[in-house]
Image: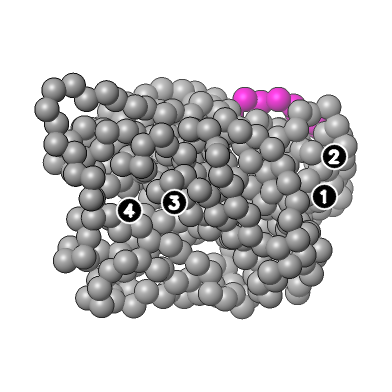
């Protein structure tokens, strides 16, 4: 995956405000019961702030909860959701950014679990991460962590927290696979973060606003002056390209042909920030939006997580088709045909260690997508 880190040397006399009044929210999952998920947003704002939410995945939507920092969402369709939010309070903050978490909804069994990861990067680039596994939210167990980026490693902890320091500058993906936490299904969650050489930098957050078929609308939130900022976008996968949208922080992209794409964005504003980083998001594009929704109902579960030599996938119905495995750059690295059956076993021992995105193509143009880690 191409990741972009942009740093500009400012020549001449440019006034940079080192005390930017910046409001960074944090979203957490309070509880879940069946398809009902309760989230809370923590932000350094006053009591008159308004909280805004939007989510994408098997279903999409947006709403405002006024000055209430909690929301209850009914996520009825199985699959991976990105739930994002921001808090507006012009009296407390000059700039506002969006925070997102990922939840995986599965109803395959009564003790199925969903996981979400929160990451905080301090001003001195110390990283703290915590993973919560609903519904029981255990703080102890076996947690296998994977870091991808300029520094790459894996480690195992017996608590749900991880602290990192002395990382090289760049964009990272942190993934965690909780084990022995009372779940019948394999749980994997990932989240990107950025390490910068200058604490006064503009960290954007990219998210999917909506999609229809292969047309996707993306939004980029960054602590910049939107009157003078210049938003730039890059994408790669089955097709690639770049575009500038001026001071508009949204873009419409036709991601065709279908497959796994990495879409990245950055906001340039030399007055506010001397350094820039790109934020990236992975999307798996089906033939139509309807098939993308349907696909999340086809996959029952997959294991083990991580996989060493074999990957087992259980389907809701007996199907035949082909499994396509992509690396994090969106490059197809392996295709495996499979015969009709509910349980499929795939040989993955020849793959390099790392994070992979898989797409199962089955009869009647049905597709299902999931991520796994190769040990």
Towards the viewer: 146 or 309: 146
Q: CA distance from mark 1 to mark 4?
A: 36 Å
Towards the viewer: 78 or 340: 78
Q: Which mark is residue 97?
A: 4
Extent of the magenta region: 330-338
Q: Which mark is residue 122?
A: 3
Q: Residue at x 66, y 66 (%)?
A: 133
Describe the element under mark 2 as helix, strand or loop.
Answer: loop
N-terminal of the two: label 1 or label 4? Answer: 4
Q: Position of residue 26 (x, y in %)?
A: 43, 62
Q: Residue at x 65, y 30 (%)?
A: 327
Q: Position of residue 257 (x, y in %)?
A: 52, 28
Quarter placement of the N terminus = top right
Report the predominant secondary structure element of the magenta stretch: strand
- Tag 2 and tag 3, C-beta contact below 8 Å: no
* In the depicted structure, whether residue 129 falls above or below residue 370: below
- Tag 4 and tag 3, C-beta contact below 8 Å: no
Q: CA distance from mark 4 to mark 3?
A: 16 Å
Quarter placement of the C terminus = top right
Q: Circle 1 sits on which residue?
A: 304
- Tag 1 and tag 4, C-beta contact below 8 Å: no
N-terminal of the two: label 1 or label 3? Answer: 3
Q: CA distance from mark 2 to mark 3?
A: 34 Å
Whether residue 273 sits left or right of residue 143 in the image: it is left
Q: Position of residue 249 (x, y in %)?
A: 27, 42
Q: Circle 2 sits on which residue?
A: 308
Q: Position of residue 86 (x, y in %)?
A: 33, 61
Describe the element under mark 1 as helix, strand or loop.
Answer: loop
Asked if residue 365 shows in the view, the reply is no
* In the depicted structure, whether residue 170 falls above or below residue 210: above
């Amino acid at each position: 995956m191409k990741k972009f880190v942009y740093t500009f040397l400012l020549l001449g006399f440019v006034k940079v405000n080192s005390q930017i009044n910046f409001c960074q929210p944090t979203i957490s999952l309070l509880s879940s019961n069946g398809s009902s998920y309760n989230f809370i947003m923590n932000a350094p704002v006053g009591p008159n702030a308004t909280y805004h939410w939007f989510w994408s995945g098997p279903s999409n939507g947006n709403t405002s909860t006024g000055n209430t920092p909690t929301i209850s969402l009914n996520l009825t369709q199985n699959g991976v959701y990105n739930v994002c939010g921001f808090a507006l309070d012009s009296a407390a903050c000059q700039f506002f950014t969006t925070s997102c978490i990922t939840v995986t909804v599965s109803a395959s069994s009564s003790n199925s679990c969903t996981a979400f990861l929160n990451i905080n990067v301090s001003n001195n680039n110390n990283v703290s991460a915590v993973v919560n596994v609903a519904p029981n939210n255990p703080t102890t167990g076996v947690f296998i962590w994977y870091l991808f980026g300029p520094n790459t490693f894996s480690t195992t902890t017996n608590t749900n927290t991880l602290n990192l320091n002395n990382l090289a500058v760049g964009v990272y993906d942190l993934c965690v696979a909780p084990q022995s936490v009372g779940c019948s299904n394999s749980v994997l969650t990932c989240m990107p973060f950025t390490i910068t050489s200058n604490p006064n930098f503009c960290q954007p957050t990219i998210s999917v606003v909506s999609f229809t078929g292969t047309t996707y609308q993306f939004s980029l939130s960054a602590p910049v002056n939107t009157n003078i900022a210049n938003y730039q976008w890059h994408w790669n996968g089955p097709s690639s390209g770049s575009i500038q949208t001026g001071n508009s922080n949204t873009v419409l992209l036709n991601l065709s042909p279908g497959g796994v794409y990495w879409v990245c964005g950055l906001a340039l504003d030399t007055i506010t920030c001397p350094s820039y980083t790109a934020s990236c998001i992975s999307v798996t594009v089906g033939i139509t939006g309807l098939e993308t929704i349907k696909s999340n109902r086809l996959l029952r579960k997959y294991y083990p997580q991580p996989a060493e030599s074999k990957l087992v996938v259980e389907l809701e119905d007996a199907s035949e088709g082909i499994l396509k495995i992509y690396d994090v750059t969106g490059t197809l690295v392996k295709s495996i045909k499979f015969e009709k059956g509910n349980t499929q076993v795939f040989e993955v021992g020849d793959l390099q260690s790392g994070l992979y995105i898989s797409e199962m193509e089955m009869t009647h143009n049905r597709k299902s997508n999931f991520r796994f880690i190769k040990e």
